[in-house]
Image (cartoon, helix red, strand yellow):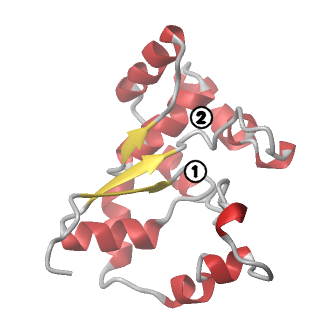
Amino acid sequence: AKIVPAVNQVECHPFFQQQKLKEYCDSKGIAFGGFSPLGSPGRSWKDKDKDILKDPVIAEIAEKHEVTPAQVCISFGLHCGVVVIPKSVKLSRIEENLKATQVGLDSKDMHQLRGLDRNLRVFTFPRLMVDGMTPDIFWDVKTDEVFTVKQPEEKRLETEN
């Protein structure tokens, strides 16, 4: 394409960090927008073991900083250079989300949060898949696994310091 997109808006949260895609976007000057930074806790199809806001590592970091698990998740995205897009219709939650900009995660926190990446998509869009198609085929997981961007480790370390 001749026109580079300004923003790539994708699902991004501690369990699905999309580091390779973020690095690619950075290398092309594309802003990386992350929707569902809390893992969409209100979704009806969620599994209890996939509830980001109840993760013990996130809870421990939240307690350490005297903030909510949601604020830790939002702050983590911001510390990683993600344009974080949390959804809420409640004024109290919107105000709480804004306070996440004041949460100062340290390098230990960032290292622990980086370790939560499970490549776990919350949104799989099954209605878009044709009969017999699996999420791995739909999302082309094999291609994603072998994709690399030059200097990914250096970029990742910059966000952790």
Left or right of 21 on screen, residue 27? left
Counting from the top left corner in percent of width and height, residue 43 is at 72, 38
Left or right of 113 on screen, residue 33? left
- The residue that label 1 is drawn on is 14
Q: What element carries label 1?
A: loop
The type of residue carrying mark 2 is Ile
Counting from the top left corner in percent of width and height, residue 110 is at 48, 49
Calculate the distance from the C-alpha at mark 1 to the C-alpha at mark 2.
Answer: 13 Å
- Mark 1: give few (<14), some (14-19) or many (20+) Cα within 10 Å: many
The type of residue carrying mark 1 is Pro
Counting from the top left corner in percent of width and height, residue 77 is at 43, 45
Lower sequence index among marks 1 and 2: 1
- Depth order, front residue of 48/2: 2
Residue 73's place in the image compared with 142, above or below, is above
- The residue that label 2 is drawn on is 61
Residue 131's place in the image compared with 37, above or below, is below
Residue 80's place in the image compared with 85, above or below, is below
- Depth order, front residue of 75/133: 133
Residue shown at the point (53%, 24%) measured from the top left: 88
Q: Quadrant of the N terminus?
A: bottom left
Q: Which residue lies furthest to the right in this view?
A: 48
Residue shown at the point (32%, 51%) measured from the top left: 81
- Mark 2: give few (<14), some (14-19) or many (20+) Cα within 10 Å: many
Counting from the top left corner in percent of width and height, residue 68 is at 59, 23
Left or right of 146 on screen, residue 131? right
Residue shown at the point (77%, 49%) measured from the top left: 50
- Depth order, front residue of 160/142: 142
User: Residue 30 got which mark?
Assistant: none
Q: Quadrant of residue 67 in the image?
A: top right
Q: Quadrant of residue 100 in the image?
A: top left
